[in-house]
Image (cartoon, grey):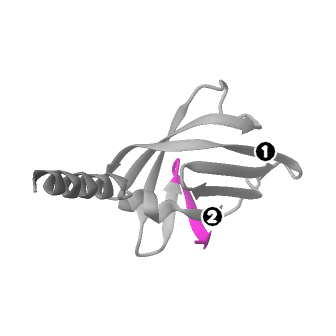
Amino acid sequence: MRKRIFIFLLLIFTITACTRDPNVQFIQGTWEIAHADADNEFFQWQFSNGMFTRQQEIDRGSSLYTTGQYRMVESDGNLLTLELFDFSGDRISYEDSPMTIKIEIDRANDTARITNTLFIRVSP
């Protein structure tokens, strides 16, 4: 009987530990800049189960493409902080060391402010 209870509790703990944060669930998919300007003709983030892709076209033809991994650092209300690491492709920062980004989520409008820039969801 004790063994069954132990296995049951272990199973419950495992399932609970695997439950993804609702803010991390929300950002899954592809996001494009809401209002392109002269500096950012195209700007896109994609988040997928711990992996990210960042594409940006600046100065009419200069494109940047970066991939890497992310992990949640903090999630509170509609604010999410991610650590980006293990980059490949174009530089995302001046150093190749991990960096953090802040994301402000607006569920009602299905938008996200990623590092203070407004993005809209273009695919789930």
* Residue 75 sits above or below residue 99 on the image: below
Report the residue at 73% width, 36% height from top.
88
Image quadrant occupied by the C terminus: bottom right
Q: Which mark is residue 30?
A: 2
Specify start and end residues of the magenta stretch as a single range.
114-124
Image quadrant occupied by the N terminus: bottom left
Three-letter residue code for mark 1: Leu
Seen in the image, is 87 located left or right of residue 120?
Answer: right
Three-letter residue code for mark 2: Thr
Mark 2 vs mark 1: in front: 2
Q: How many marks?
A: 2
Q: Nearer the viewer, residue 69 or 121?
A: 69
**Name of the residue lying farthest toward the left:** 1
Seen in the image, is 108 located left or right of residue 39?
Answer: left
How far across and down, in percent of the image, does residue 96 sit?
A: 65, 26
Q: Earlier in the sequence, mark 2 or mark 1?
A: 2
How far across and down, in percent of the image, does residue 102 sit?
A: 46, 46
Quick one: SS at disc 1? strand
Q: Nearer the viewer, residue 61 or 51?
A: 51
Report the residue at 77% width, 46% height from top.
65
Determine if the magenta segment contains residue 62.
no
Determine if the magenta segment contains residue 115.
yes
Q: Characterize the local packing of mark 1: few (<14), some (14-19) or many (20 or more) Cα atoms within 10 angstroms.
A: some
